[in-house]
Image: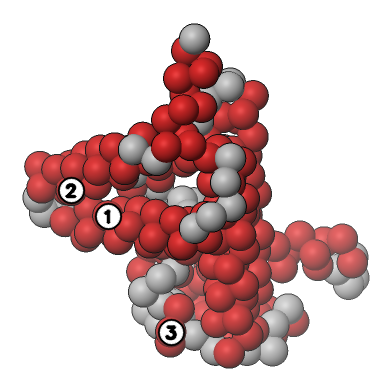
Amino acid sequence: MGVSRQQAIENRQAIVAAAEKLFRERGVDAVGLAELMKAAGFTQGGFYNHFKSKDALVAAVMDKAMEDGGDAFASIIEGARSADADPVRQQIQWYLSPEHRANIDAGCPLSGFVGDARRLGEVARSAYAEGLAGNFEQFTRVIEETSGSKEGSRRKAITLFSQMVGTLLLSRAVADIDPALADEILDEGRQHLLTAVDAQPGIRSRRRSRQA
């Protein structure tokens, strides 16, 4: 008896989910097909019923990860707006939190896959680049809305996000071997960026008007 179309879709999704988890934990090159299919609950022989190659799987993983990352970003921003909080500060506080640092399996995919990105196939690299560009566009719009000005908003978005990613990666890199240093990196980076955001005239004036 053959597998139904719906079951085939669910099996493919399970493979992608298992692969994403393993790729994030150990890197794309370190994970073999036998291992990832076992993690998904299937035999290695069934892999080619769903994907032509490992590169095709990696591309599917990257597509899903970037879409999920964009949705997560939008959710954080919407939550901040609903709470009448500053969405830029909210994003910094979440991104540079111990919880996000520990969430390698499902945290921001742009930082999660940054080490692998340049070694991936062309389709997967394109998905990563599109996800990064989309993040910059979203962040730019948020900064424009928060500051009330479009001037320099894209430059601020790129600079701010790049600093967030760098801080997170350095903190993650030493979290197991030197937790105190990892916390220091995270705390100092977070405080520096929050101070920099508070110093922006548009954001500062908006906060004062809310407090009045």
Are discs 2 and 1 less than 8 Å apart at CB?
yes
Residue labelled with disc 1: 167
**In the image: residue 199, left or right of residue 206:** left
Q: In the rendered image, which quarter is residue 188 located in?
A: top left
Mark 3 residue crowding within 10 angstroms, few (<14) / some (14–19) / many (20+): few
Residue labelled with disc 2: 185
Q: Which one is earlier in the sequence, the residue at label 2 or at label 1?
A: 1
Quadrant housing the N terminus: bottom right
**In the image: residue 182, left or right of residue 79:** left
Mark 1 residue crowding within 10 angstroms, few (<14) / some (14–19) / many (20+): many
Secondary structure state at the residue bearing disc 2: helix
Q: What type is the residue that disc 3 sits on?
A: Arg
Compared to 177, does 30 lie above or below?
below
Secondary structure state at the residue bearing disc 3: helix
Using the rendered image of the protein, determine whether residue 75 is visible from the camera's viewpoint.
yes
Residue 2 in percent (x, y) is at 88, 72
Using the rendered image of the protein, determine whether residue 190 is visible from the camera's viewpoint.
no
Residue labelled with disc 3: 118
Q: What type is the residue that disc 1 sits on?
A: Thr
Residue 21 in percent (x, y) is at 48, 60
CA gap, disc 3 and disc 2:
26 Å
Residue 211 in percent (x, y) is at 47, 12
Q: What type is the residue that disc 2 sits on?
A: Ile
- Residue occupying image coordinates x 11% and y 54%: 177
Colour pattern of the rendering: secondary structure
Number of numbered tags placed on the structure image: 3
Compared to 73, does 86 lie above or below?
above
Name the front one of labels 3 and 2.
2
- Residue occupying image coordinates x 66% and y 59%: 67
Are discs 1 and 3 less than 8 Å apart at CB?
no
